[in-house]
Image (cartoon, grey):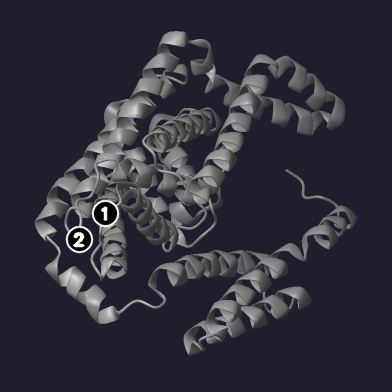
Amino acid sequence: MPTPDPPARASDDSRTRYIRPLLLAAVAAFFVYHGWSPASPLQLALGGVFAILAALAVTGRLFVPRHQTVAINIGISLAFLDQVFAGLEWDAMGQALARANYWLLGPAFAIVVLTLFLRTWRWQWLLRSVGKVPFAAAFRATCLGIGANMVLPARAGEFLRVFALGRATGYAKTAIFATLVIERILDGLTILLLLAGVMLLGVHSDQLHYLGIVGGAFYLAALVALLVFFYRQAWLVAIVRHLLPANWAERAIQLLDAFGDGLHVLRNGRQLLVVSAQSVVIWVAIALSFYPVMLAFEYGAPVPLFAPFLLTPLLALGLTLPGAPGGIGIMQYMAVLALQLSMATTGAVLAGDFAEQAAAFSVLMHLSQAVPEIAFGLWAFLSAGLSWREVGAREVRSVT
């Protein structure tokens, strides 16, 4: 597609050039505020670094927008890590990790692997509107995408997942991508259902209400947009023909048609019911994968059974925020928050080193998810015969 003419691009830049610097300045202000009293050299140093990056971003010199985005994501992750680990007794946290029951990682790993099969099973049902997809091809693409999300920024694993399946089957990548959009909306609505269930059990906080409202508005809006697109596609095509030049319009209409092919599950009531039930099974399994790791530590009181079902929506909603690859920082913060809220609901008397125990859990929980997902992702990468050149190529990020 031709690039915009220089005047339009310049106008666009003039409206957006200060957004990233402002975000970098906000990160700098966060660290300066938290490091000022009592004085923390590390936090003040981070504040200074991000203040310098914000100044460089304003001038536009030596710091391109892509690098600014990376710096913002890292800054957000560091801010969440600061909320969890600042002020901890590191010796106590080390002792918590040393005393943890690492045998319980076995069941956690097994359940994480099970969720990979369950996700593939659901994806096969969603892909029925695109074509017949072998389980092995869908499983490799699923493992590759989920594993890549743990190590690549900006959820790039989703695009890699589309690329891998399109490469293996020859089906249109845009249609495959449409099934992932439906998958994400089903995921969002399911985790909101889990969050509502946990809140009915008596877990209440301002953070939960805020996350529930924002998450619900986002996923419901996305669902409405999909329904409008699917049932009013002819109307959208007419608008495209009216607004775009003929050659651009034909290209856009081809993409719209391919995307629409992947949305036919919305017209099949039985298929939609099945994938909705599968989504519930998947997210219950994901929640249960956290529970063995929770039991590996001593908090001074038993961990309530609903705790992993609170952690699951918190993690899922938290990971919609920008951050470093793998959700570093965000996952730790949500893990500690879930434990705090769960224990507060039961009124349990907690151990004096609860903060260190919770922080240690957040580290081990992250590893319990990352290790099997990255391992299976690497297996899928090698078995699919992909190369780093292909993964880094522009077409991996394209759904056309």
Residue 272 higher or lower than 173, as above or below: above
* Residue toward you, 230 or 132: 230
In this image, 368 relative to 320: left or right?
left
Q: Residue at x 61, y 64 (%)?
A: 69
Quadrant in which the C terminus appears? top right
Coordinates of residue 35 in the picture (x, y in percent): 53, 82
Q: In the rendered image, which quarter contains the N terminus?
A: top right
Residue 198: image quadrant is top left
Q: Secondary structure at mark 1?
A: loop
- The label on residue 274 is none
Q: Looking at the image, which residue is at 63% across and 19% down? A: 230
Residue 127, percent from left and from top: 42, 23
Q: Position of residue 17 (x, y in %)?
A: 77, 64
Horizontal and vertical percent position of residue 261: 55, 20
Please indicate whether residue 346 sits to the left or right of residue 170 in the image.
left
Q: Are marks 2 and 1 in contact (CB under 8 Å)?
A: yes
Residue at (44, 30) in percent of width and height: 170
Q: Residue at coordinates 30% horizontally, 79% vertically from top-left?
A: 89
Q: Is residue 47 above or below residue 236?
A: below
Mark 2 highlights which residue? 300
Between circles 2 and 1, the one closer to the viewer is: 1
Q: Is residue 137 visible?
A: no
Q: Image check: 19 left or right of 265?
A: right
Determine the secondary structure under disc 2.
loop
Q: How many marks?
A: 2
Q: Earlier in the sequence, mark 2 or mark 1?
A: 2
Amino acid on which the number 2 mark rests in the picture? Gly
Look at the picture and state if 251 lies above or below 306.
above
Classify 12 as above or below 168: below
Quick one: 38 or 60, which is closer to the camera?
38
The answer, for residue 3, to whether it is visible in the render is yes
Q: Disc 1 designates what residue?
A: 348
